[in-house]
Structures are given as C-alpha cells and as structure tokens.
Image (tube, coloured by chain):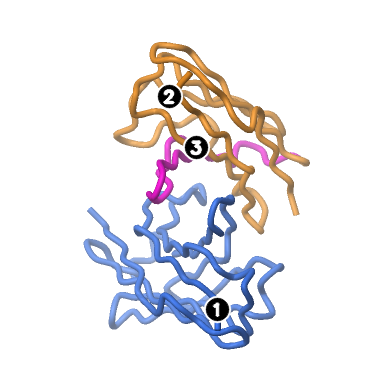
Amino acid sequence: DIQMTQSPSSLSASVGDRVTITCRASQNVNSYLNWYQQRPGKAPKLLIYSASTLQSGVPSRFSGSGSGTVFTLTISSLQPEDFATYYCQQSNITPHTFGQGTKLDIK
Amino acid sequence: QVQLQESGPGLVKPSETLSLTCTVSGGSVSSGSHYWSWIRQPPGKGLEWIGHIYYTGSTIYNPSLESRVTISIDTSKNQFSLKLNSVTAADTAVYYCARVHPWWQLGDWGQGILVTVSS
C-alpha cells in the first residue's frame, strides 16, 4: 500500500494567518492527490483534486500544489470556519489511502 | 444536487455481519458516470477506504478487508450496499458512502452512520 504522511499532525494558527500542510507519498502518485476538510461531527468535504484543482464552491484562499510524492495544501488567510482537520488522499493506486490528518486549531 | 444517505443498524454483535445501505437521490447510480464508494472512520481516528462499485456490479476492494467485505448495487432502488462479516470491536466506526468523481476523488458524501460492534 502507498503510505501517505502529513506534516504537521497538528497546527495552531490565528485568523488571517497563511498556513501550509504537507503530504508525502511513499511512492509516485502522479497528480492523483486529493485534499479534504473535516469539521467535528461532519463528513469530509472535498477541497482539491488532482493535486491543484479547486472543487467547485471552495473558496479561492485554498490552493494545492505538487506532483509525484510531495504535495502541499495552502490556506492563504485563515477564516474562523477553516479550523478543522485536513486529510490528503492518493487515488492513483488502490487501496486509495489517506494521510493521518492534520488538525488545525485556533492559537 | 446529489444526496447520499446511509442507513442500517447502529449496533452489531461481534462475529455477526454489518449491513448498511446508501440511498442516492438527485442522481442515478446507473448513470455510468461515477463509481460509488464506502469509507469508514473509527472514533477519533483517520479515514479508511473500503471499496468502490460501478453500476455494472464491478467492484474494487481494500485488500485489508477484501476477505470480509461485499459491496453490491441495486439500480432499481438507486442504492448500493455494504456487508462486512465476522465483525469485531475494531470495526466500530462511522461508515460513509460517497460518489466517486473522474479523478477518483470522493466528491459527494453521506452524513455517515456510527456502527458500534458490541455484545
């Protein structure tokens, strides 16, 4: 299985901050990399797919980049509703594995 | 706008079979444009992909669960289902159904259903 490792596992930040989360794959996943946001008690929500394509309706402060084995999710200016847990997922090779999650909370 | 809703027992005894159904509205499971998927999340932990199914009945499973899992589809009812047999406490989780988009991303999710395995 492809192992997905996110860093950091947790992150404290303030409203208005720029934050970046990194996801590393244990082997090449090309651009089949997705990012999800999960608020407590809610289902995950797709933010970005194919590494850098913003899902319809997702604010433009979210962006993704990378290819191969290293990917990043950036939030340019944190808003109160962005405090949540973020997961990356590779969908290049089954099983489609997720990272362990990055919990973003308010400083 | 497509909506997905999981249903089934919230409590299953150890060694028995977990059975869940996902009802799709606002879209058709037989459209051929999407695969359909099950994912689970143990309490306080991360996400685990269980498998996908196409309207033809073709399936792809996570090898870690493949010996115990069956995903099926009922196009007449616009539903797809999950069966997981020989469950243990480790199978306690919130189970989500989702619609798979062309880059294999999980674009639409149900709200999830908590299934507890306990006697």
**Residue at left 42%, top 59%?**
B98
- Residue A60 lies in quadrant: top left
Task: Evaluate if marks 1 and 3 touch, with contact meaning CB atoms under 8 Å apart.
Answer: no
Foreground residue, B64 or B44?
Answer: B44
Whether A80 is drawn above or below B72: the answer is: above
Q: How many numbered marks have been drawn onto this rendered protein structure? A: 3
Name the residue carrying label 1: B118
Whether B10 is drawn above or below B27: the answer is: below
Q: Regarding mark 3 in the picture, which secondary structure is present there?
A: strand
Task: State the image coordinates of residue A56 (x, y, percent, origin top left).
Answer: 32, 36
Name the residue carrying label 2: A62
Q: Which mark is residue B7?
A: none
CA distance separating discs 3 and 2: 14 Å
Q: Label 1: how many residues lie within 10 Å, few (<14), some (14-19) or many (20+)? A: few
| A66 part of magenta stretch | no
What shade does chain A have? orange
Q: Is residue B31 shown left or right of residue A10?
A: left
* Circle nearer the N terminus (3, 2): 2
Name the residue carrying label 3: A85
Q: Label 3: how many residues lie within 10 Å, few (<14), some (14-19) or many (20+)? A: many
Give amino acid for label 1.
Ser
Task: State the image coordinates of residue A44 (x, y, percent, origin top left).
Answer: 43, 47
Q: Chain of mark 3?
A: A
Task: State the image coordinates of residue B39 (x, y, percent, origin top left).
Answer: 51, 61
